[in-house]
Amino acid sequence: MIREQEATDLKREYADLFEIDANLDRLVKKIELLNYVNPLNIEKEKHRFYASKYTENPAFNYPKLKFKPYKLHRLLFTQRLERIKDDKLKKLYQEVIYYYSNMIQCIETIGQSREFHYNSLRMFGTPNDRDVRNARFILHFADEPVSTDMEKIYSAKEAKSYFEDFGKQYDFPLNVKFATHLSAAAMVSNSTQTLLIKKNTKFSKNQLLTLANHEIGVHLVTTFNATEQPLQIFSNGLPNNVETQEGLAVLSEYMSGALTLKRLKELAYRVLASDSLIKGYSFADTFDMIHN
């Protein structure tokens, strides 16, 4: 951690850089994809999809935007990056602006199938042939023997207590809240530095250990570490930070002894599902492919 006097000296010496950094921080804090990509009617559409015998594609509703996309684009590109003297830093901030500009386009087209499809491809890419082959290879393994550690017997309230105990090993405040509109059992909101738990969800012992090391041990640890840095750019995430974050998070699951074959298969199915949807297959077609 950099000392306060050192930070003050840096801000004085690189005033233009810190001004631009602060401007971008104010702007991009409004942009968090996970705040908008989780449907508001997940459970309703899940029941409708099941009732249709898995044939009718869900019709998801999404949260309304809390920012004006065009205005935010304009403000991003009015930053006077030419005032940054170091060419490498200047290029880094250019890439950050392009990255969040693409993120805005991605968010504003959520729910617009074709437009979101291409914007998300530009943001996150697609599984390559090797990824798909590796996913299929993992799925060839026989399932593990049934273990009591995999039984979902813990309530969301008990999960909250577990995560709070786990968080005591770190020197940052752990804020845990319940949420209803989540597609995952738990996730971190970077902008609010909060661990969100899906209400009315049951957890297994292994799942609690997995989520603790994944969400708290990586996502929240890096979130709070970033706040200790002089430049706010690290708090919001650099281009390709998603790949780095998720890779580290799964590695953390492995290093903690929480990574199981079942979990690996879950990740493999996500790769195949992404590949299927990107190739133009519908939600129902993709569901059928995974379950048959």
Image (spheres, helix red, strand yellow):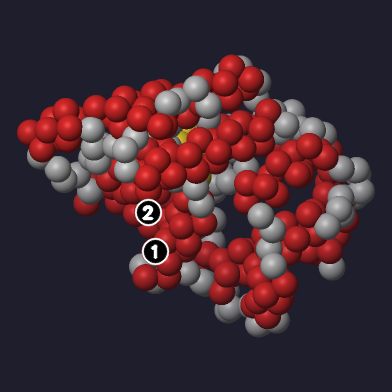
Q: Quadrant of the C terminus?
A: bottom right
Whether the residues at callouts 1 and 2 have beta carbons within 8 Å, the answer is: yes
> From the viewer's perspective, is 126 left or right of 261?
right
**Label 2 SS:** helix
> From the viewer's perspective, is 243 left or right of 40?
left
Q: Quadrant of the N terminus?
A: top left
Percent position (x, y) of residue 238? Answer: 44, 45
Q: Which residue is drawn at 51% across and 52% down?
A: 240
> From the viewer's perspective, is 61 left or right of 230?
right
Q: Residue at x 66, y 55 (%)?
A: 125
The quarter of the displayed image where residue 17 is located: top left
Visible residue check, residue 158? no
Task: Answer few, some or many: residues within 10 Å of disc 1's Cα (few below 14, many 20 plus, some between 14 and 19).
Answer: many
Depth check, front residue: 184 or 44: 184
Task: Answer few, some or many: residues within 10 Å of disc 2's Cα (few below 14, many 20 plus, some between 14 and 19).
Answer: many
Depth check, front residue: 108 or 143: 108
Depth check, front residue: 157 or 289: 289
Residue 3 position (above or below residue 288) = above
Percent position (x, y) of residue 216? Answer: 36, 49
**Label 1 SS:** helix
Q: Which residue is drawn at 19% across and 44% down?
A: 171
Residue located beneath label 2 in the image: 218
Depth check, front residue: 138 or 165: 138
Q: Could you tell me the amino acid type at mark 2?
A: Val
Q: Could you tell me the amino acid type at mark 1?
A: Ser
The quarter of the displayed image where residue 113 is located: top right
Residue located beneath label 1 in the image: 252
In primary-sequence order, the first of circles 1 and 2 is 2
Visible residue check, residue 183? yes
